[in-house]
Image (cartoon, rainbow, N blue to C red):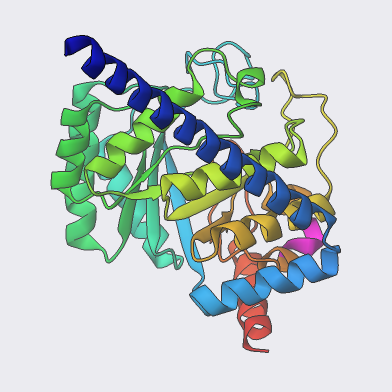
Amino acid sequence: MSTKTDNKDSRSSLVARRSRHEARVTRNESRNNNAETLLKMPLKQLISTANQTRARHLGDKLELCSIINAKSGLCGEDCKFCAQSAKHGCGVPAYPLKDADTIVQAALEAQAIGAKMFGIVTSGNKLTDQDVKTIAAAIVQIKEQTLLSVCGSLGALEKEQLKLLSEAGLSRYHHNIETSRRFYPKIVSTHSFDDRIATITAAKEFGFELCSGGIIGMGETWHDRIDMAVTLKELGVDSVPINILVPIKGTPLESIEPISAQDVIKTLAIFRIILKDKTIKIAAGREAILKDSQLKGFLAGANGMIIGGYLTLKGNELQADYKLIDRIKEEWKQ
C-alpha cells in the first residue's frame, strides 16, 4: 500500500511540476510577444497610447518629490553607476547621518517648494540601530510639523528597524531593482538581485507603499528594460522612479555613450503601458539628458518628478521646474 501511495504522490508531484513549467513557458511567451509588439510600435503611436493610458488611470495627478542626501559616500557596495561607492574614488562629499533637526529642516524646505513626498536617502546597504532611531525621531517631527508623506531609501533594513520606522510614520519605502535580473550581475556584484527583491518584500509586509525603479542607459537592451518593468509590475510597486544614467568620472561607466532623449521617451512610454496606474517618476538625469525634451517625457506617460536636486547631481532651478509643471498641466488639459 505504501509503495502505491508513494508512486501516486510522485506522479502528482511530477504533474504539478510540469504544470508550473508550462505556466512559466506560457508567461514567458506572452511576455516576449508583448515586448515585440511594443518595440515594433511606431514611436508616435507608442507615445499617444502611453499618454492616453496615463490620463485614463491617473488623470492630472503629478507627484512632486524632494529628497535629502542624509548620509553620503563611503558605500561598500560596487554599483558601477554610483559615485558614492568607496570602490570608485569619485571624490563625492562623504559624511555620516545628519541629525534629526537637520533632516526635519530639509523637510520643511521641501514642503515650502511644493513637494508632497519627502525622501530620506542614505548611502550604504545597512544602517545601525542608532541611525534608524535618529531617522525615526525625524519622521515623527516631520509628521507633526508638515503635511508631507515620508519615504525612506535606507538600504536593506532588518525587520525590527522597519517596524520602528512604520511606527514613527514612514509611509513609503524605496529600494530600486536597478535593471533586469539578467543584466543585474553586470552592474553589481556585492549583493544580488534576489537581495533587492527580499528587501522590497520585507517592506511590503509592513504595509509600506513601495517605490522601486532603476536606471536606464547603462548598456542594457530594450528587453532588459521591458523585463524590469514587468518585474516591477509583478512586485506590485506603487511608484517607479526612472533614473537616466549621467556618466560620472571615476565610475566604471564613465565612458559609456549617454542614452538618447528619444530612447528615454520610448522607455517611459513602454513603462506606462505596462504599469498602467502606477506613478512613473523621471528622476536623476531628467535635466542633463532630456534637456529641452523634458515636457515630452510627461506626454509619454510620466507623472512624477523630483524637484530641488538629487544625491550627487544638481537639478533644475526651481523657477524652471515651476514653468515646466505649468506646461505639463496645460498640455494634460488638452
Name the magenta segment's main secondary structure: helix
Q: Is residue 50 left or right of residue 131?
A: right
Tell me, yes or no, if residue 113 can be seen here: yes
Q: x, y (%) of residue 283?
A: 59, 50
- Residue at image position (80%, 70%) is 45
Viewer-proximal residue, 256 or 16?
16
Q: Quadrant of residue 266?
A: bottom right
Q: Is residue 86 left or right of residue 108?
A: right
Q: x, y (%) of residue 304?
A: 54, 62
Residue 328, above or below 288: below
Residue 179, above or below 108: above
Q: x, y (%) of residue 149?
A: 31, 59
- Residue at image position (60%, 48%) is 242
- Residue at image position (43%, 63%) is 115
Q: x, y (%) of residue 69?
A: 44, 38
Viewer-proximal residue, 131 or 241?
241
- Residue at image position (63%, 82%) is 332
Q: Quadrant of the N terminus?
A: top left
Q: Is residue 219 left or right of residue 157?
A: right
Q: Which residues are magenta?
A: 290-294
Tell me, yes or no, if residue 154 can be seen here: no
Q: Quadrant of residue 138?
A: top left
- Verify whether residue 291 appears in magenta: yes
Q: Quadrant of residue 201?
A: top left
Viewer-proximal residue, 224 or 32?
32
Q: Quadrant of the C terminus?
A: bottom right
Q: Is residue 172 left or right of residue 169?
A: right
